[in-house]
Amino acid sequence: MTNPMIKVMLLLFLVLSIRADEELMKKECSQTGNQNLCLFCLATDPTSNQTDLAGFVNITINCLDAQLDILINDVTSLSTKGVGEAIENVLEDCNGDFSIAKIELYLAKGNLVARNYENASGLVKTSVSNLQTCRGNLQKIKFNESSHVYGDIDIYVDLSPVAKTLIDRLH
């Protein structure tokens, strides 16, 4: 039979370590310029309470990647609704831009593993330009069919400096 005092001490240790990890999340996210978005992103991953700064970076890049998946699905869905050839062409170009951004995030992850933080940070930063190109092209054709596409781009644009700041803090 297990000593009840050991169980209580283990439970107390677990509670204190989770609290300490939450404080680390808040501390790191406070350095990013968008603490709420950073904390929201980290909260989507159940391992965030058990990781360090490098883990936070990985989680944040996963959030960016998931945001790209949302954009690809939204734009693909819109392009099949018969919105007209010109709009469909721009939406197809947007999917190409999003795919390039996904590749850049993949390369950023590889650079993180290789501890090439400067390149990883640069790749995250340049991935944003692909989304801004899409937004600009949609605005040129006065695309208003789905304002949530613009909102989803905004989330990515707002989250990318969070990832970049966390990466920069690694070195």
Image (spheres, helix red, strand yellow):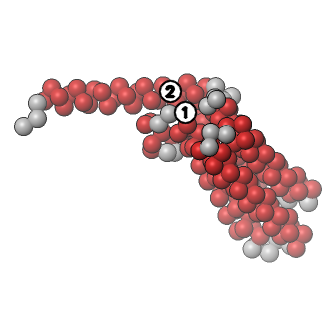
Q: Locate residue 38 relative to residue 118 in the image: left or right.
A: left
Q: Mark 1 = which residue?
A: 53
Front residue of 38 and 74: 38
- Above or below, 96 against 36 in this view is below
Question: Pointer 2 and pointer 1: residues touching (CB < 8 Å)?
Answer: yes
Looking at the rendered structure, the kind of residue marked 1 is Leu
Q: Mark 2 = which residue?
A: 24
**Residue 113 place in picture, x, y as percent:** 59, 44
Residue farthest to the left, as pictured: 1
Label 2 neighbour load within 10 Å: few <14, some 14-19, many 20+: some
Residue found at x 72% / y 68%: 76
Looking at the rendered structure, the kind of residue marked 2 is Leu
- Tell me if I can see residue 153 in this picture: yes
Label 1 neighbour load within 10 Å: few <14, some 14-19, many 20+: some
Tally the marks.
2
Q: Locate residue 27 relative to residue 124 in the image: left or right.
A: left
